[in-house]
Image: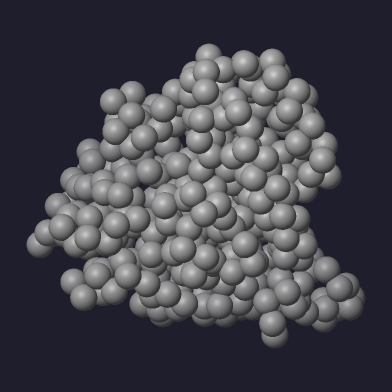
């Protein structure tokens, strides 16, 4: 199947009992065994569930890999990856990662002996120089949250594998519509299914995808042991969202391109960060590895700095001031006080994440309505 068809049909079969075209929701905690020592494929939903299994197979097919393991949130998926390591192991990570990942790595996992080095992975040489004997994995976001840095996945993957390391990629912002990291050498691909994949601000979820049977076995063991699994109903909602992924992403992408071009030409805007703009330092790399455009995320700063940015966000009417991203509604966020509030100020500034930075998740509304809302808000923020 081609990509658009996989989104709609991969792993989806009519229910054998009723012929229902939509997979049933198996909202059951446990399953009756026909006899001791024999089950019908399922025994307890923490271990496995028919609805969750369809989601995992569907997402694996969409990503172009063999295996998927679903979790209750994007953060529990990231945490599951780290649980295959032990005290003393070292991980090289993108410096500009989601604030929740920074919190997990720096405030929790370091207490258990894991060590982390943060580098700007948009320059592969930084990754090479950070590797040491205890390094076990390179972990990147591309594009990153919220500075939209782009990593050359093939180049960094080559470095990781030359050193015998795992290579993990958080591809939440790109989605499989734009980027499938396993094709460029990623061993593990992570998505927050909360965002574009489900796409409607209805659920919290995450998923890990791999082509390696040994990694799938380890991740499934963590999933079963820790139990941070999505409910069958949440899995069903994600599957329904996936059916329109291509349609939604095409609109997100087109709207974001128009909004980014508008912002870049606005006299009150100091800088715009969007991989689809030629002004982006990694535009050529993004254009080479991302298909069908550059997704729907934009970050920008106003000439008036933090005060102007806050005034802008307090003045929007159509754009929703909200923490999340990747849904059909346009959402605007102040990373320094919201998504990255727990990242120390000196660390934020070292990344280039200033207090005046605004993150915009461009929705699928009419682009003219989004632009008109930004226009009136920018006028108030002068």
Q: Which residue is depicted at the point 21% across and 75% down?
A: 162
Q: Position of residue 170 (x, y in %)?
A: 45, 57
Query: Which residue in the rendered view is the most extreme toward the bottom?
Result: 1
Q: Which residue is depicted at the point 75% across and 40% down?
A: 329
Left or right of residue 213, residue 199 in this image: right
Q: In which quarter of the image is residue 13?
A: bottom right
Number of numbered discs overlaid on the protein picture: 0
In the image, residue 228 above or below residue 17: above
In the image, residue 349 above or below residue 74: above
Q: In which quarter of the image is the N terminus?
A: bottom right
Front one among 86 and 353: 353
In the image, residue 258 above or below residue 372: below
Left or right of residue 245, residue 346 in this image: left
Q: In which quarter of the image is residue 380?
A: top right
Visible residue check, residue 160? yes
Q: Which residue is depicted at the point 12% across and 59% down?
A: 132
Q: Position of residue 204 (x, y in %)?
A: 61, 45
Q: Position of residue 298 (x, y in %)?
A: 58, 43
Q: In which quarter of the image is residue 259?
A: top right
Q: Which residue is depicted at the point 22% across and 60% down?
A: 125
Front one among 160 and 40: 160
Visible residue check, residue 220? no
Q: How is the rendered protein coloured?
A: one colour
Q: Quadrant of the C terminus?
A: top right
Q: Where is residue 300 in the image (x, y as percent from the top left)?
A: 54, 35
Left or right of residue 129, residue 60 in this image: right
């Amino acid at each position: 199947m081609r990509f658009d068809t996989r989104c709609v049909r991969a792993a989806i079969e009519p229910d054998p009992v009723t012929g229902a075209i939509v997979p049933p929701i198996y909202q059951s905690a446990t399953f009756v065994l026909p006899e001791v020592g024999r089950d019908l494929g399922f025994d307890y939903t923490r271990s496995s569930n028919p609805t969750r299994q369809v989601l995992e197979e569907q997402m694996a097919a969409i990503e172009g890999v063999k295996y998927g393991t679903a979790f209750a949130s994007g953060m529990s998926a990231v945490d599951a990856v780290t649980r295959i390591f032990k005290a003393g192991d070292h991980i090289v990570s993108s410096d500009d990662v989601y604030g929740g990942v920074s919190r997990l790595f720096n405030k929790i996992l370091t207490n258990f002996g894991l060590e982390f080095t943060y580098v700007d992975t948009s320059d592969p040489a930084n990754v090479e120089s950070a590797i040491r004997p205890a390094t076990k994995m390179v972990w990147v976001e591309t594009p990153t949250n919220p500075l939209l840095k782009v990593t050359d996945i093939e180049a960094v993957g080559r470095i990781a594998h030359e050193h015998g390391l795992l290579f993990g990629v958080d591809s939440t912002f790109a989605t499989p519509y734009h980027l499938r990291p396993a094709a460029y050498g990623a061993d593990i691909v992570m998505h927050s299914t909360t965002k574009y994949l489900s796409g409607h601000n209805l659920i919290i979820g995450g998923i890990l995808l791999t082509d390696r049977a040994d990694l799938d076995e380890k991740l499934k063991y963590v999933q079963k042991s820790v139990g941070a699994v999505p409910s069958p109903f949440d899995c069903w909602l994600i599957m329904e969202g996936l059916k329109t992924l291509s349609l939604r992403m095409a609109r997100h992408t087109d709207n974001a391109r128009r909004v980014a071009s508008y912002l870049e030409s606005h006299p009150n805007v100091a800088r715009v960060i969007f991989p689809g703009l030629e002004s982006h330092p990694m535009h050529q790399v993004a254009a080479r590895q991302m298909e069908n455009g550059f997704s729907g995320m934009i970050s920008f700063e106003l000439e008036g700095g933090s005060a102007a940015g806050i005034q802008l966000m307090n003045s929007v009417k159509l754009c929703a001031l909200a923490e999340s991203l990747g849904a059909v509604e346009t959402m605007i966020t102040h990373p320094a006080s919201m998504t990255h509030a727990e990242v120390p100020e000196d660390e934020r500034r070292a990344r280039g994440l200033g207090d005046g930075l605004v993150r915009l998740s461009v929705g699928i509304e009419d682009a003219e309505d989004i632009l008109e809302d930004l226009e009136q808000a920018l006028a108030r923020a002068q």
